[in-house]
Structure formats: structure tokens, C-alpha cells
Image (cartoon, rainbow, N blue to C red):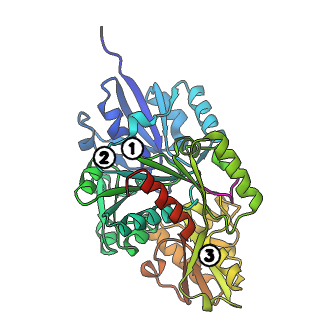
Amino acid sequence: MKRVIKRVIISGAGGRDFHNYLVYFRRQPDFEVVAFTAAQIPGIEKRHFPKQLTRTRRKDILIYPEHMLPALIKKLHADYVYLAYSDLSHQFVAQFASRVLAAGANFGLLGTNDTYIVSKKPVIAVCAVRTGSGKSQTSRAIAEIFRKHGKKVVGVRHAMPYGNLMEERCQRFASSKDFAKFKTTIEEEEEYQPWIDHGFVVYSGFDYAEIVRQAEKEADVIVFDGGNNDIPFIKPDVHITVADPHRPGHETTYYPGFVNVLLADVIVINKVDSAKRADVDLVEKNVRAANPTAKIIRARSDLVVDHPEWIAGKRCALVGDGPTLSHGGMSFGAATVAVRLYGGKIVPVRAFAVGSIKKTFEKFPHLQHEIPAMGYGKKQIKELEQTINRVPCDVVIDGSPANLSRMMKINKPFVTVDYELGKDAMKELEKILKKRGIV
């Protein structure tokens, strides 16, 4: 009997989609991936997935904008569409599936059994219920715990391959000089810079079999630092999920954040020092009902401000983490918290945005007081610089994790703001890791 090959479109956002292709679809003789679609990240469509990474194809696989999906299903005679990106409401996922079904294709999601890479070294995965919950500060806290106990830690970041895919399979960042080598975006540097500042090596890319193989050569322990609210790419020995009480209820209503709640060994309810007590209690109630065996830790998110004395009484222009403020749905971040704490005056910024930054404000009307640090290319980075410099203010408060002052020329005094996980939560995490015999 002739084998029937099922034609597949993978809908992603430049990360999970390529991982799922490499670890699953490339190995399945009964599936042929005929296209990718791209969403969420500007400028990542109109690329090709290289034929060299497909094993059998003679041509690259084309990447299209997601809005073309219904027409592509019909044009390419697709049998299946697999969703492969994150930070989506359950309502969005159901509506997405409905559009696929209406166009005549089947809808699918891949689970952990088919997408985990297994490491020879202990792996701690830090994931979240939404982007901007505090994964990175939790990941760094865990890395510091292991370093305290004499273990060499290597971070592995969630995929962010936004450029030339043949050059981005496996990337190692040990200093800021590596940013130029890999032509990174602001969004990438926001994630890698804090690891480097703390003296750790961090890997990224999208070929996680190779990434893990390289990281194992120099690590006693691997910390997987997740992206958005995605599930881990590497099978964890301990799965830690960070929840955000500033968005109560999202822990059970976003995909795949709720998967992380169900998988978690430990759930860290972060930002308890700045959230309402009732919201913290609601998040704990929800996650405990969903996962009664997980250890729950309430954690402070402590501000680190390099020049707090520059804020009091000053007109402040605020900059925040781009993904958190855009599709993450947050209207404020660390910069707002710092200005309120130290008595600054928040300057409205929307009217001064230019180019793609202006379009970002228009697309996300909940944004009012913080400029999202969007920078997916040189042009957008320049527009971000122009937007910041146009704001009539005395000082710029940068709450993005990236070192923006290194990337652009800001014509005002510049204050950087970051978060670190509270010490009490670190002690609780250390106890758990000791009990597991990993520390």
C-alpha cells in the first residue's frame, strides 16, 4: 500500500516552531512540513528555513505571515496545522483552531514527550504563566545558589532566532562582544546581558540537541531560562514555574502557561511586595487547586537602581521590557515602580513615539507611560532612540533588561533599573534543591 504523506504547516514565532520541526517533524516519514507561518515578532516572516537542516528537501521551507494561513491551507493542500508559539490566551488558541478547522485542516499541538531534549547533566527549568513574570531573576538566583556550592552553571535560553537561521543554530554568549558576533536584537540582549553581568555563560539558538551537547561540556548544572510562558525544551529534573499576581487569573487561562502550572515541582508567586494581597491569595488558590503537590513560594522582587538620587522630583521618561509591555499585556514595569518609590514625575510618552514604536503604541492601547524597548533590527533600534530622545524630560529610567545606553546615544541622564529575587525566596529554593540532592 502506498504511504500517505500528511502535509503540515507549523505556525510559530521564530523559536518553538523550529525546535518542534527539528526534534519531531524532521524525523517523521509520514509528515512533510510545507510551510511555516510567523506572528508576534515583527520582521521575522519573509525568511526561509534552510534546506540543509531538513535532511531530504531540495528547497528551503518558506515562512509566511500568519494572516495568510487560511489561504495557505488551501493553496498548499495542508492536512494539519500545528501551533508552536506561546503567551496566548486559551480563547485565542480556540479561535485559532477554529479558523484552521474552517479552512479544512486538522489542528494540533505537540506535547513534552515529543519535544524534550534529554541532558546528561542536571537541568533546572524556570518557566512562567505569562511573559514578564520574573523568570530571568529566578533563573539567576538559582544559578547563584549553585555557584555558592561550587557548581559550574551554564544558562540555556529559550530560542530567539530572528536573523539568518544557518548562523543561529547554536550560540554561546560569554561577554557583550558576542552580541556583535551574532548580530543580536534588543530583545535577545535583554535576556543574555543579565547572565553575562552575573558572570555566567548562556547559550541560545534553536538546535537544542546541539546546544545541550555544547553546554554539557562546560556545565555541572544547566539552568533552562524559558521565554514567554513556554514549556521547557530540555527535560528538567526540577521544573519551576513563576506566577505573576499583577495578572491574577492568567495562571489558568493562558497557553502554555497553564501547562507549566500543571508540570511544576515548585511555583514561585513573584512580586508579592508590589501586588495586592488579595491578588496574591487568588493566584495561590488557583495554582494550588490545579497542582496540589507543588511547593509554593511567595517571593519579593527587589528593585536594583543604579542612581536612585537622580529620580526624586525629576521629570522621568520610562522605558520597559518590550515583550512584557506588548503581547505580555502589562502596562508598567520596573521603571514605573522605581519612579513611584523614589518620588519622580512620570512624563507621558505616547505623543513622542516615531515609526514602528508609534505603531506599537497604536497596536497595544493599554500602553500609556512606558516606552516598550522594541528593537528587532537596526531601523527599529534607531526609532527607539529617536523616541526616547524626543521626550521632554530630565532623566530616562530604563527598566528593560538590556543595556540600552550601549546600543544608542541617549541625550539625557540615564538610570538603569533591574529586579533580583528576594533573599527569603532564594533560601527556600536552596532548601528544595538540597532536598532533591542536586546542590
For disc 3, the neighbor class at 10 Å (few under 14, some 14 to 19, many from 20) is: many
Q: Assess whether residue 310 is covered by the magenta stretch.
A: no
Which quadrant holds residue 336?
bottom right
Marked residue nearer the N-terminal end (1 or 2) = 2
Residue beneath the point at 38% across and 52% down: 437
- In this view, the residue in front, 419 or 383, is 419
Question: Amino acid under label 3?
Answer: Ala
Mark number, residue 335: 3
Residue marked by disc 2: 119
Tell me the quarter of the image containing the C terminus: bottom left
- Residue sitting at 28 percent across and 47 percent down? 120
Q: Position of residue 132 (x, y in %)?
A: 57, 60
Residue 150: x %, y % from top left: 32, 67
Query: Could you tell me the amino acid type at mark 1?
Result: Lys
- Residue 187 on image: x %, y %: 47, 64
Q: CA distance from mark 1 to mark 2?
A: 7 Å
- Residue bounds of the magenta highlight: 242-248
Q: Which residue is mark 1?
A: 235
- In the displayed structure, would residue 433 be above or below residue 401? above
User: Is residue 423 shown left or right of residue 78?
Assistant: right
